[in-house]
Amino acid sequence: MSYANRRSLLTCAALLTLALIAAAVLALGGEEESLPAAGSAAVPASAADWGLSFPSPGQAPVGNATREELAQYGAYYLGDTSEKVIYLTFDCGYENGYTEQILDALKKHNAPAAFFVVGNMVETAPDIVRRMAEEGHIVGNHTYHHPDMSKISEQEAFQKELDSLAELYQQTTGKPLPRFYRPPQGKYSQENLKQAQALGYKTVFWSLAYVDWYVDNQPTRQQAFDKLLPRIHDGAIVLLHSTSKTNAEILDELLTRWEELGFRFASLEEL
């Protein structure tokens, strides 16, 4: 084999290795931590996954849409960045035994939160959903079936997903569902933002999360703190999953440590 051919093969192998490494990094990023390219902060007209990059510890991250761009549609990923305030949110796809422990920790700290629920959660754990509302937490709309909403372009179909959940919540609690919406998996489009706004919803993304949703591969206590403490920032909208055993076990201590850093907890209503 000639030198030129050997060099060509080595170059191809190197490129393939880099591609595999890149794919692995993206896979590890997961739903909550996909990183946008530099300078890509714009609301896309087509489907996108919500993504964040963290320039430095303790500073608010950069989203793949700016605060100003999202504000046009009544959407948020950050709260008030002029004060040490945290907005706690939980995504609740189903109940597996940890939500009440989470509610107990929130009650101990007098910390309001928002729980974004789907139809299964309301159907199978109505008492817990009622407790959320009775203890002053926001119960938000995470859709009835948890589909990829970015694939839904028709207003009628989009509205059906949200209305079905809202009606079930009304029947279960006797109260109207607060108009806060979180896209399942963070998948959204510009059209989705318009659709939610037309229905009177505020779309709520997040500025801090970590990989906590694999119930059979939970992070350790230390892994959780290593993510959630250095990256906390003023005006953070924190996303946690209520199905996480780790979250339930560390939440009391986590809230204490954030309080020791000077943070207070506020409701999404302050947005």
Image (cartoon, rainbow, N blue to C red):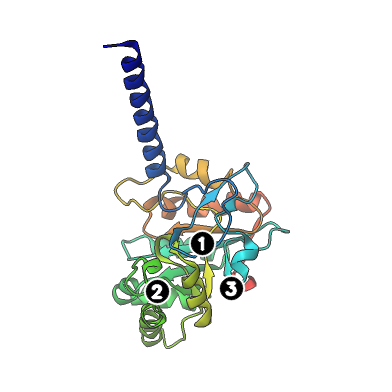
Tell me the CA gap for discs 3 and 1: 16 Å
Query: For the residue marked with disc 2, what is the amino acid?
Result: Ser
Q: Which mark is residue 214?
A: none
Q: SS for tag 3?
A: loop
- Circle on res. 153: 2
Sequence order check: which comes first, mark 3 or mark 2?
A: 3
Per the rendering, the mark at residue 74 is: 3
Whether residues under marks 1 and 2 lie with C-beta atoms below 8 angstroms apart, the answer is no
Q: Residue furthest left?
A: 1
For mark 1, what is the residue? 44
**Residue 135 seen in render:** no
* 145 vs 116, nearest the viewer: 145
> For the residue carrying disc 2, how many other residues have a C-alpha within 10 Å: few (<14), some (14-19), or many (20+)?
few
Whether pointer 3 and pointer 1 mark residues with C-beta atoms closer than 8 Å, the reply is: no
Q: How many numbered circles are shown? A: 3
Residue placed most toward the observer, 53 or 223: 53
